[in-house]
């Protein structure tokens, strides 16, 4: 152990004593094999940036245009690569600008380590320049946070940070380092990765008893239904999950966060759950007899009204986080643990089966959804383009191989309903928090996390303007990301609710946009604006084939609505296919 | 049905941990009836005793959320019949009244109160007990010119507590990645789940 750490240390920074706290931070990142940091310098983090200056070859720093961009980029990086995203920000406003991203990463379980500078320790609590109590501000939105005031703590605390962020149910960790600790010289004994924090249990013990009970329930079921979330992706359990459902032969639906863990055209796939998910899986949740929930947390957008949710079913809930069991939905059999570990045990105990009649019910619902809705959405007769047909044509060109990064709103629902995705980690979206302005920075991060993949950021005209300054980051570092703006000249999702539930009182949802193409060109990004059906395919192809980043703005139908919809306060079986049904 | 639950939380001794625990309650707009924090019998490990009035279901979720805090070892959730609990209260009364009226002295004896400080102008008594005892004495002394009163938060010992100390120590020794929680959940669930 000693010698390994020592070697890394010498390889990384070339000395072992009188090392500054800042250098120890850099050594920690190198030892954790961090290759990319997203950040923005400032007064209180200058010593760390000074140390970073000598490591440009091994540690790439992406200078964003706003700290919120840095953390969303780190999220995109983590979601695309499975590695921990790293962020640097300075004290005060630098740190507070991370708040939205931290909340987003917390609710979507994304592993992030943020390192913020802080004023000198002797100035803490004096309202010093750029001082904020970032630890207390971020406590409810981090998995763990800690303030370092002495350089001697740095190696151990950073090791803990990386361990906690990525283990168990992942999440964001923030380490606040006072400037004196960054500058302080200390006797550095090397970096040791953390494998154990005595008060922290990342994974509960897997109990065979529950798995046996779960298997019995499944084997006896007539209409079992599998629903899964991001836990399958976070646990790297895609293979184990496929083996499980293929043996079980059970219809399978995903939450928005679980999407892409199995190919979207898998024969057992019946679509997406949730407020704007597919008709069949929502409706039939209330007809199944055994509901097998894997790595998902029964968000209210998935369950609709809880007292009308799957009341007839016995519920098996597999989750790594014991706090999720019985939080929203009462479980019949809880299976605590990482699904990578529990699924193979369960697969072994279940019978190989199929449920042709039960599947036929899903087929029937799908047919109804297709005739009444999808057909019109994908092959519209309107003059104006619809978001759905843009997705259809995009699928024809990507064949489902691209990473789809979405913002928040109507386009997000449409993209998740209609894009084809062949491999895991292809769907990057702000699911739990619903953060507008997520797409551009997350797409930048995703490109650094998965450079070999085609990255397409899809957004509305509202969200596009919310972190549009990150076009500057694209200009400077040239990550090849495609920006697809679906412009309906409205804050579409809010407008839809105003139309359906507020008597069309369109209170402040008509939003004007700049000329996006001209704006992109100011950042040296190629682009095009289209509104006609006959130029859609060629323009999308031009965007995808362009050797660098490209912005395509598509004008779409102004007052289109996303359906189906489980109206708020209604049960999942009350899902409607059109506004006439509300 | 809402009732009093006493949570016993074992934690690392860390700056800011009190806040991390407190916001679990405040986020859900749950009032803390009582909140005590002190070093435990195990070196460097702290023990919080928290009292809330809530339903079993809500408390169970609170317990799990508190256990998710990285620096928390273990949370125990007990109803009043499962614990021995006490509070301490201090009462400041004019010395002249006590000297004059023998009834007061009898009263104090009856409640097991002891004098902590006796001065010419006032005397401070301390009494230990549960809400009722402390409140009753308060009501009585109020009649005799009570000057000042303060009560502590609750501290509680869990009756079936042989394993408490051991369990926390076990946690350090056991497989560091795995939680050694008992199988109580399975037993509980057998009522609902019938095979």
Image: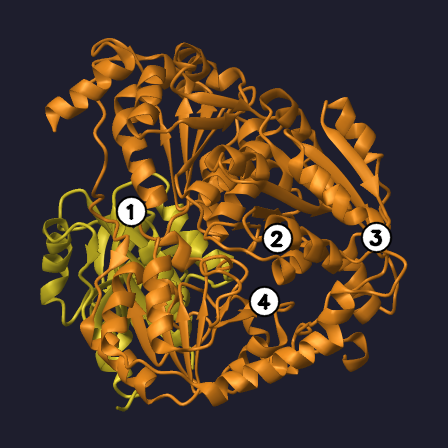
Chain colours: A orange, B yellow
Give the Cα distance between marks 1 and 4: 31 Å
Label 3 sits on a secondary structure element that is helix
Which residue has dot 3 on it? A533
Q: Nearer the viewer, residue A179 or B142?
A: A179
Which residue has dot 4 on it? A301
Q: Label 1 lies in what chain?
A: B
Is residue A308 visible in the rendered structure shown here?
no
Q: Position of residue A203 (x, y in %)?
A: 26, 56
Give the Cα distance between marks 3 and 2: 30 Å
Which residue has dot 2 on it? A434
Label 4 sits on a secondary structure element that is helix
Q: Label 3 lies in what chain?
A: A
Q: Residue shown at 29%/59% (left/top)? A: A340
Pointer 4 and pointer 3 on the same chain? yes
Pointer 4 and pointer 2 on the same chain? yes
Q: Which of the labelled discs sits on residue B71, or is there none?
A: 1
């Amino acid at each position: 152990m000693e010698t390994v750490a020592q070697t890394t240390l010498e390889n990384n920074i070339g000395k072992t004593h009188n090392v500054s706290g800042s250098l120890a931070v850099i050594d920690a990142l190198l030892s954790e094999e961090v290759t990319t940091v997203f950040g923005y310098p400032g007064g209180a983090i200058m010593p760390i940036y000074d140390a970073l200056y000598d490591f440009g070859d091994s540690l790439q720093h992406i200078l964003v245009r706003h700290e919120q961009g840095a953390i969303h980029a780190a999220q995109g990086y983590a979601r695309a690569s499975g590695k921990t995203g790293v962020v640097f920000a300075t004290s005060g406003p630098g740190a507070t600008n991370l708040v939205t991203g931290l909340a987003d990463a917390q609710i979507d379980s994304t592993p992030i380590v943020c390192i913020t500078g802080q004023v000198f320790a002797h100035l803490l609590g004096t309202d010093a320049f750029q001082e904020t109590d970032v630890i207390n501000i971020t406590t409810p939105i981090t998995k763990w946070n800690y303030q370092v005031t002495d350089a001697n703590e740095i190696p151990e605390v950073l090791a803990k940070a990386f361990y906690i962020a990525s283990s168990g149910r992942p999440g964001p960790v923030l380490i606040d380092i006072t400037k004196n600790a960054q500058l302080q010289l200390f006797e550095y004994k090397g970096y040791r990765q953390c494998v154990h924090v005595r008060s922290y249990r990342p994974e509960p013990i897997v109990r065979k008893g529950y798995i046996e009970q779960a298997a019995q329930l499944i084997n006896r079921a007539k209409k079992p239904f599998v629903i899964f979330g991001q836990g399958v992706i976070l646990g790297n359990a895609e293979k184990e999950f496929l083996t499980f459902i293929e043996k079980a032969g059970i219809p399978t639906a995903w939450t928005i966060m679980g999407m892409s863990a199995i190919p979207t055209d898998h024969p057992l796939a019946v679509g997406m759950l949730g407020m704007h998910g597919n008709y069949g899986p929502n409706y039939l949740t209330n007809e199944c007899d055994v509901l097998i929930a894997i790595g998902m947390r029964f968000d209210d957008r998935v369950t609709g009204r809880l007292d009308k949710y799957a009341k007839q079913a016995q519920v098996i809930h597999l989750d790594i986080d014991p706090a999720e069991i019985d939080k929203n939905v009462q479980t019949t059999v809880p299976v605590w643990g990482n699904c990578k570990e529990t699924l193979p045990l369960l697969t072994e105990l279940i019978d190989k089966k199929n449920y042709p009649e039960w599947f036929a019910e899903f087929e029937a619902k799908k047919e109804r959804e297709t005739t009444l809705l999808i057909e019109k959405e994908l092959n519209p007769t309107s003059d104006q383009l619809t978001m759905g047909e843009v997705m259809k044509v995009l699928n024809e060109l990507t064949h489902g191989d691209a990473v789809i990064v979405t913002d928040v709103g109507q386009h997000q629902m449409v993209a998740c309903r209609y894009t084809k995705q062949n491999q895991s980690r292809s769907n990057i979206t702000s699911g739990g928090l619903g953060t507008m302005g997520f797409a551009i920075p997350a797409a930048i991060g995703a490109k650094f996390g998965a450079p070999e993949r085609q990255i397409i950021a899809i957004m509305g005209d509202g969200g596009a303007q919310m972190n549009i300054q990150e076009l500057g980051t694209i200009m400077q570092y040239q990550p090849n990301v495609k920006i697809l703006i679906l412009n309906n000249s409205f804050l579409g999702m809010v407008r839809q609710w105003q139309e359906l539930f507020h008597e069309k009182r369109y209170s402040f949802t008509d939003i004007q946009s700049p000329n996006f193409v001209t704006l992109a060109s100011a950042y040296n990004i190629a682009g095009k604006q289209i509104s006609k059906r006959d130029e859609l395919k060629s323009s999308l192809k031009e965007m995808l084939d362009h050797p660098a980043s490209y912005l395509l703005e598509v004008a779409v139908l102004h007052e289109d609505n996303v359906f189906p919809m489980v109206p708020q306060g209604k049960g999942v079986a009350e899902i409607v296919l059109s506004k006439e049904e509300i | 049905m809402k009732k009093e639950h006493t949570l016993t939380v074992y934690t690392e001794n860390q700056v800011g941990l009190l806040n991390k625990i407190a916001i679990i309650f405040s986020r859900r707009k749950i009032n803390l009836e009582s909140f005590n924090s002190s070093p435990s019998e195990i070196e460097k490990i702290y023990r919080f005793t928290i009292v809330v009035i809530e339903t079993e279901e809500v408390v169970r979720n609170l317990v799990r959320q508190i256990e998710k805090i990285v620096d928390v070892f273990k949370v125990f959730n007990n109803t009043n019949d499962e614990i021995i609990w006490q509070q301490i209260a201090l009462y400041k009364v004019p010395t002249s009244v006590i000297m004059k009226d023998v009834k007061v002295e009898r009263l104090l004896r009856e409640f097991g109160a002891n004098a902590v400080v006796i001065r010419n102008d006032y005397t401070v008594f301390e009494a230990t007990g549960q809400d009722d005892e402390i409140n009753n004495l308060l009501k009585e002394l109020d009649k005799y010119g009570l000057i000042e009163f303060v009560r502590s938060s609750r501290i509680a010992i869990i009756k079936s507590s042989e394993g408490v100390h051991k369990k926390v120590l076990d946690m350090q020794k056991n497989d560091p990645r795995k939680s050694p929680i008992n199988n109580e959940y399975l037993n509980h669930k057998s009522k609902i789940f019938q095979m």
